[in-house]
Image (cartoon, rainbow, N blue to C red):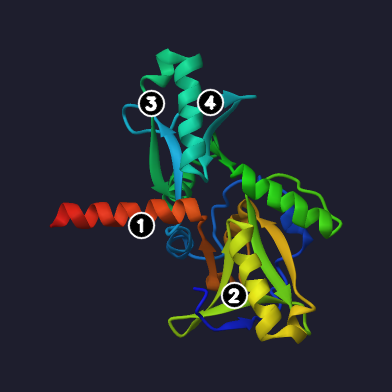
Amino acid sequence: MMKSLIRWSATLSLLGSTLLGTWSAQMPKVLALPEAEVIELLQGVPVFTITTEDGGPLIVNLEDQKVTQVFMSQEDANRFLAQLQKNQPEIGSRVKVQPVSLGEIYRFALANNTETESLKFAYIPMQSAVESAKKVLGDNGQQYQGGVPLFILRGGPENSILTIEQNNQQVIPFFFEKAPIQAIAERMKKDQPDIAATMKIEVVALENIIGLLQTQDDAMLKQIQLVPSQETMKFIQEAIESQQSQGQ
């Protein structure tokens, strides 16, 4: 992606300061984008859940709500499982960490949201991403208000959002880590110093991006590309290599 052509999109007006909070809206019955398109957009991001012997999610009842945790990091999920096995071995011995795409989580959430009962998903961000988000937001005079941080780059004469040309298409990358977007910013200081002077890294919440996909009708939302962390990219690569070796 770093070798792709970098450009600036027209300002995506939906991505304002309102995206800094966590997303807690109910799943609407009518989606602004078709369900299949939302799932496709989310499909490329592996996340990690704790599942029971029958393959269902481990559910906790909190304040009369059913909640299941979705970890952005496999390492965090493994640590949670190890702690559960230590503190509640009767439960911990019967569950495991299960990778699943964010698209499947979304599909499951829709299927389990009814007028009488709904299952809430608690998205657990990587702590390193949270610390980076706190620093970025603090530098911008804002505060981290929860949620899974995503990092974008904004700048240019119209304070536009960074886009990258990929396979002859313009995509708007949202990074789960600060480092890749910081690397792009540093490179642009050399390649486009006039624009670099106006650039600023910003933070939005994954939960609110999902909320926008459900409630807003904007063609630019289809250009969003979620870029997983280095840890998750390594997991994807290892999974691909494992499948290839099994197929030989």
Task: Give the residue type at disc 4.
Answer: Val
Cα–Cα gap, marks 1 and 3? 25 Å
Q: Position of residue 156 (x, y in %)?
A: 75, 82
Disc 4 versus disc 1: nearer the observer: 1
Cα–Cα gap, marks 2 and 4? 36 Å
Which residue matches tag 1? 237
Mark yes or no: residue 175 visible.
yes
Q: Is label 4 in a helix, a strand or a loop?
A: strand
Which residue matches tag 2? 220
| First along the sequence among labels 3 and 4 | 4
- Judge whether 130 appears above or below 13 on screen: above
Q: Nearer the viewer, residue 3 or 46?
A: 3
Which residue matches tag 3? 95
Q: Is label 2 in a helix, a strand or a loop?
A: helix
**Residue 192, quarter of the rendered image:** bottom right
Which residue matches tag 4? 60
Q: Are marks 1 and 2 in contact (CB under 8 Å)?
A: no
Residue at 61% across, 60% down: 179
Q: Are marks 1 and 3 in contact (CB under 8 Å)?
A: no
